[in-house]
Image (tube, grey):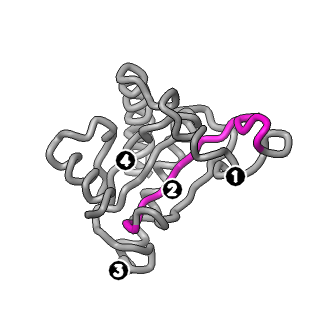
Amino acid sequence: MCLICDRVTGIQNGTNPYFVKELETGYVVIGDHQYFRGYTLLLAKKHVRELHDLPIAIRQKHLAEMAIVSEAVAQAFSAEKMNIESLGNGDAHLHWHLFPRYAGDLGHHGQNGKGPVWWLPFEEMYADHQKVTPEELERLKSRLLEVLTDLETELAQS
């Protein structure tokens, strides 16, 4: 079974606590682990392996939604830079990792703290102490939802 499909099913039946907002082509969720504060994912509603597997109109809408979510994450969490990735090597269901980046956030793992998030050892990024607490999860979700809703309103009015 697909882990992303399981998470989408949890959203649909109201049991996924990380769920932030439903969009036309995907679901916005806060990441389980928060080494990079504000780490967010956009999970495609349709189970496809690759972006190019989506019909062109849905693909274009999905990319536009991903860009809005990225902007919302950047604003909500005062990111200095955003790293956006769709890998799918482990979970072959289209999804985006949206990492807000901050000065020195890699510490000693990157040259002067700069580099891709994947320079951080997996064990450190996904350590138990990086799991978001229920209280912090609610704060992150609330802040992201507020900014995302504002951006969508601005777009609708333009």
Residue drawn at point x = 31 percent, y = 53 percent: 23
Do the CB atoms of the residues marked 1 and 2 lie less than 8 Å apart?
Answer: no
Instruction: Using the image, determine if residue 26 lies above or below residue 111.
Output: below
First in residue order: circle 1 vs circle 3: 3
First in residue order: circle 4 vs circle 1: 4
Can you tell which mark lies on residue 67?
A: 2
Residue 72 location, x and y as percent? 49, 42
Identified by mark 3, the residue type is Pro
Identified by mark 4, the residue type is Val
Identified by mark 2, the residue type is Ala
For the magenta stretch, what is the residue range? 92-109
Label 1 Cα crowd, 10 Å radius (few <14 / some 14-19 / many 20+): few
Is residue 9 one of those drawn in magenta?
Answer: no
**Which residue is label 3 attached to?**
55
First in residue order: circle 2 vs circle 3: 3
Label 4 Cα crowd, 10 Å radius (few <14 / some 14-19 / many 20+): many
Do the CB atoms of the residues marked 1 and 3 lie less than 8 Å apart?
Answer: no
Does 7 sit left or right of 116 as displayed? left
**Which of the two marks, 4 or 2, is nearer to us in this view?**
4
**Which residue is label 1 attached to?**
116
Front-most of residues 67 and 124: 124
Label 3 Cα crowd, 10 Å radius (few <14 / some 14-19 / many 20+): few
Label 2 Cα crowd, 10 Å radius (few <14 / some 14-19 / many 20+): some
